[in-house]
């Protein structure tokens, strides 16, 4: 809980709670980061549609309670990473999702969201 409050203060201090994010921006972020499906063809980019749908649903819930901002997006990602108990190998899924999120939060798309 204390870490969550600290993260909230840090994110809001950097305009995370002030900058309004639009739905197309969120969808684009997901598609280019955590929902990006890897293919053998270098010039082809695919999206994991099931994962995108799941994340957009979580985003909708977070947006409704926190507003359409970066803090809500951060909460969406952490919720997705930690709610893996229904999967076949929850510990591995959680670890892999945490890696994906860490990478996404270093991405150009994340940095461009003021």
Image: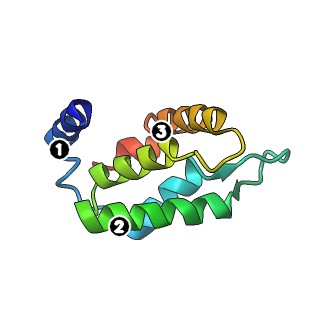
Q: CA distance from mark 2 to mark 3?
A: 18 Å
Q: CA distance from mark 3 to mark 1?
A: 19 Å
| Residue situated in front as seen by the camera: 87 or 30 | 87
Q: Position of residue 18 (x, y in %)?
A: 17, 54
Point 48% across, 33% down: residue: 102
The residue that disc 2 covers is: 22
Point 58% across, 45% down: residue: 85
Position of 5 with respect to 102 (left or right) is left
For the residues bearing labels 3 and 1, Cβ distance under 8 angstroms:
no
Position of 93 with respect to 7 (left or right) is right
Position of 81 with respect to 36 (left or right) is left
For the residues bearing labels 2 and 3, Cβ distance under 8 angstroms:
no
Which badge, 3 or 1, comes first in the chain's sequence? 1
Q: Check the image and report above or below for 17 versus 96.
A: below
Q: Which mark is residue 12?
A: 1
Closer to viewer: mark 1 or mark 2: 1
The residue that disc 3 covers is: 107
| Residue situated in front as seen by the camera: 72 or 42 | 72
Q: Residues within 10 Å of mark 1 (few under 14, many from 20)?
A: some
Point 84% across, 48% down: residue: 41
Residue 67 visible in this rendered orientation of the protein: no
Which badge, 2 or 3, comes first in the chain's sequence? 2
Q: Label 3: state its secondary structure.
A: loop
Closer to viewer: mark 3 or mark 1: 1
Position of 87 with respect to 85 (left or right) is right
Q: Position of residue 68 (x, y in %)?
A: 28, 63
Q: Label 2: state its secondary structure.
A: loop
Q: CA distance from mark 1 to mark 2?
A: 18 Å
Q: How many marks?
A: 3
Q: Residues within 10 Å of mark 3 (few under 14, many from 20)?
A: some
Seen as rendered, the residue at the extreme right is 40
Q: Position of residue 38 (x, y in %)?
A: 75, 46
């Amino acid at each position: 809980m204390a870490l969550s409050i600290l993260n909230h203060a840090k994110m809001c201090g950097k305009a995370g709670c002030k900058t309004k994010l639009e739905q197309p921006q969120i969808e684009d972020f997901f598609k280019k980061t955590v929902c990006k499906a890897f293919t053998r063809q270098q010039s082809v980019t695919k999206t994991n549609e099931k994962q995108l749908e799941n994340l957009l649903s979580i985003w909708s819930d977070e947006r409704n309670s926190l507003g359409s901002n970066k803090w809500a997006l951060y909460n969406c990602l952490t919720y997705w990473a930690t709610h893996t108990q229904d999967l076949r190998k929850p510990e591995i899924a959680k670890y892999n999702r945490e890696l994906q999120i860490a990478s996404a939060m270093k991405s150009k798309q994340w940095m461009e969201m003021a």
